[in-house]
Each structure stands twice: as C-alpha cells, then as structure tokens.
Image (cartoon, rainbow, N blue to C red):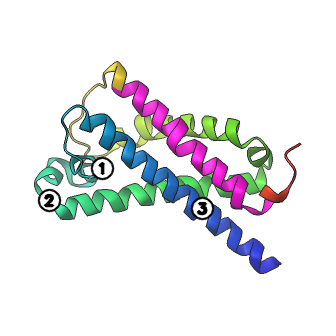
Amino acid sequence: MPNDLSRSVPKAILIGAMVAALLDMVDPIIFYGLRGIPPRQIPQAIASGILGRASYSDGIPSVLLGLAAHLFIALVWATLFVLVARVLPFLTRHAILAGLHYGAFIYGVMYYLVLPHTNLYPKNEPTLAVLINSIGAMVLLVGLPISLANQRFAPSSRVSSN
C-alpha cells in the first residue's frame, strides 16, 4: 500500500497539470480564434515572455517553447497545490471552493507579479472581455481541475468529505 500512496501524489500533480494546461491552451485558441488570431500565436505569445517580439517570427521552435513553458507553469501550480493540500486537508475536502479560490490566486500572481516582469509582447491593457475570459479561465480551467485532480488522486482523497 505505501507504494500506491507514493504514486498518487505524482499522479495528482501530473493529471491536474495536464488537464489544466490543455484547457488553458484551448480556451485562448478559441477565444482569440474568434477574433481572427491564428492558433500558433497563442503558444508564441507564451514564448514571448522569454523571447520577446522575436517569438512571433521564430515559427515552430517558438510554438514548442511556448507549449513547454505553458506545461511547466501548470506543473508548478499543480505541484504547489497538491503539496499544500497534504498539509491543509480542508483543500481536499472542499475541492470545488478551494479550486475556485486557487484559480483566482493564480490569476493574481501571474497577471500582477509574474507577467509584468517578462518580455511578454504585446504589453497592453486588456479589454473587459479579455479580462473576464482570463479570470474565468484561471478559476474554472486551471484552479478547479488542479484541485479536483488532487481530490481524486492524492492520498487524502480517500478520506470522506462529509
């Protein structure tokens, strides 16, 4: 049984990160695609945090860099949540509420602390639609899946939530 438990934390992290990363990539592809932005520019925009404006002229390498960076960031957020949930079991017992709050926390950290210190291009003020979509995506498509994966796959998920 200890071997089962040791595999469940990595499984919660990996599944949470992969689902969050996938949903958080599909959302802007659809959202900006409806506004005429080609899908390749979404991961290139992520890569621009590292490469700046050059990411848009670098073709497939910048797309792959953006996808890798996106997955890495999701892995960091999932790891943080799952490890903290080992110490604070109420995060697992109240997974939906915890996930929604965690997504809002991620939004605040990413948009107000991390992204302003990158080479992200273009730097502009978001419209109301972009703001609502960005917050909604972090809350519903990132925080919530990470929390639900933790509840489903992590060791304390076997504890009753009643």
- In the displayed orientation, state which residue is furthest to the top: 128
Residue at x 18%, y 62% (from the top left corner): 60
Residue 9 placed where, x, y %?
Answer: 68, 66
Within the image, what quadrant is residue 153 found in?
bottom right
Which callout, 3 or 2, points at the residue further toward the start of the chain? 3
Marking on residue 46: 1
Q: Which residues are magenta?
A: 130-156
Residue that mark 3 sits on: 13
Front in this rendered view, residue 127 or 24: 24
Q: Determine contact: label 3, label 2, CB under 8 Å.
A: no
Which callout, 2 or 1, points at the residue further toward the start of the chain? 1
Residue 90 placed where, x, y %?
Answer: 79, 44
The verdict on residue 124 being magenta is: no
Say which element carries label 3: helix
Residue density around tag 1, few if under 14, some if 14–19, many if 20 or more, within 10 Å: many
Q: Quadrant of the N terminus?
A: bottom right
Residue at x 34%, y 27% (from the top left corner): 130
Q: Amino acid at mark 3?
A: Ile
Q: Is residue 140 left or right of residue 128?
A: right
Residue 67 placed where, x, y %?
Answer: 33, 58
Q: Quadrant of the C terminus?
A: top right
Q: How far is mark 3 from mark 2, CA to CA?
A: 30 Å
Residue at x 21%, y 41% (from the top left corner): 121
Say which element carries label 2: loop
Q: How far is mark 3 from mark 1, CA to CA?
A: 22 Å
Q: Is residue 64 left or right of residue 147?
A: left
Residue density around tag 2, few if under 14, some if 14–19, many if 20 or more, within 10 Å: few
Q: How far is mark 2 from mark 1, CA to CA?
A: 13 Å
Residue that mark 2 sits on: 59
